[in-house]
Amino acid sequence: KAGVTQTPRYLIKTRGQQVTLSCSPISGHRSVSWYQQTPGQGLQFLFEYFSETQRNKGNFPGRFSGRQFSNSRSEMNVSTLELGDSALYLCASSALPLVGELFFGEGSRLTVL
Amino acid sequence: KNEVEQSPQNLTAQEGEFITINCSYSVGISALHWLQQHPGGGIVSLFMLSSGKKKHGRLIATINIQEKHSSLHITASHPRDSAVYICAVYPNAGKSTFGDGTTLTVKP
């Protein structure tokens, strides 16, 4: 079956703009989690959604937001972009939160100029 | 102090050697994942552990819940095992936390 699909794969934005990233989980998976990966901070947890409900949120400012739709697809939005938001944004899907096997997408690489 | 400590940070081995990467954590967990990331590549979850031991091919992962410690072993290492290995802890409550990763280089 198809894997986790993230779009867009690459994007360039300027400071102050906003961006929306999309994640389509594996069919049947209802849990989606988002992560930010940077060379300096490594992998950091952003959000986790299960059945359209946000279960957990990482230590990121309110500029970072997300949601999950009834078909389990998820989006994350970053408003008022800063240079430090340049990163690889990864999503992962699982059948169950916390204890489900994780399947990662290829990521969306955001560059903020 | 990070909630998840991985060691070593970097590891170079000769092909065929036995490799161990360690992960210690400080919180109660629902599950611990070992992740693999090749240069420029995506992340693959190798194992999800909540107790005991799992084996997949040349890879073995163990976890000791009481000691809050997990190890990833690679037997008969191969250059294609060269990658960054990341320990990810999923607490009973709260946010998942990641180790800084172990960069493994296996030389032929």
Image (cartoon, coloured by chain):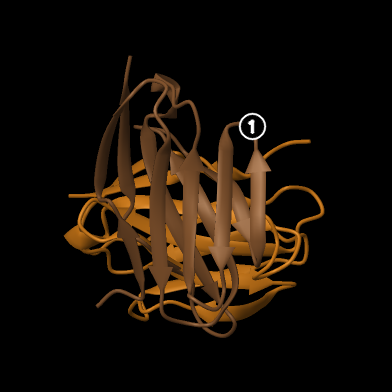
Chain colours: A orange, B brown
x and y, in percent, of residue A3 in the image: 67, 39
User: Which of the 4 image quarters holds residue A37?
Assistant: bottom left
**What is the quadrant of the N terminus of chain A in the image?**
top right
Of residues B28 and B17, the one drawn nearer to the viewer in this rendering: B17
Of residues B60 and A42, the one drawn nearer to the viewer in this rendering: B60
Q: Is residue A94 left or right of residue A67?
A: right
Residue lying farthest bottom?
B93
Of residues A87 and B7, the one drawn nearer to the viewer in this rendering: B7
Residue plotted at (66% across, 66% down):
B51
Residue plotted at (40% across, 33% down):
B38
B21 in relation to A98, above or below: above
x and y, in percent, of residue A58 in the image: 43, 77
B106 in relation to A42, above or below: above
Residue A103 seen in the current view: no
A35 in relation to B77, above or below: below
- Which residue is under mark 1? B57
Q: Is residue A11 left or right of residue B65?
A: left
Q: Residues within 10 Å of mark 1 (few under 14, many from 20)?
A: few
Of residues A67 and A18, the one drawn nearer to the viewer in this rendering: A67
x and y, in percent, of residue B75 in the image: 50, 32
Residue plotted at (25% across, 50% down):
B9
Q: Is residue B26 left or right of residue A95?
A: left
The residue type indicated by label 1 comes to Gly
Q: Which SS class for mark 1?
A: loop
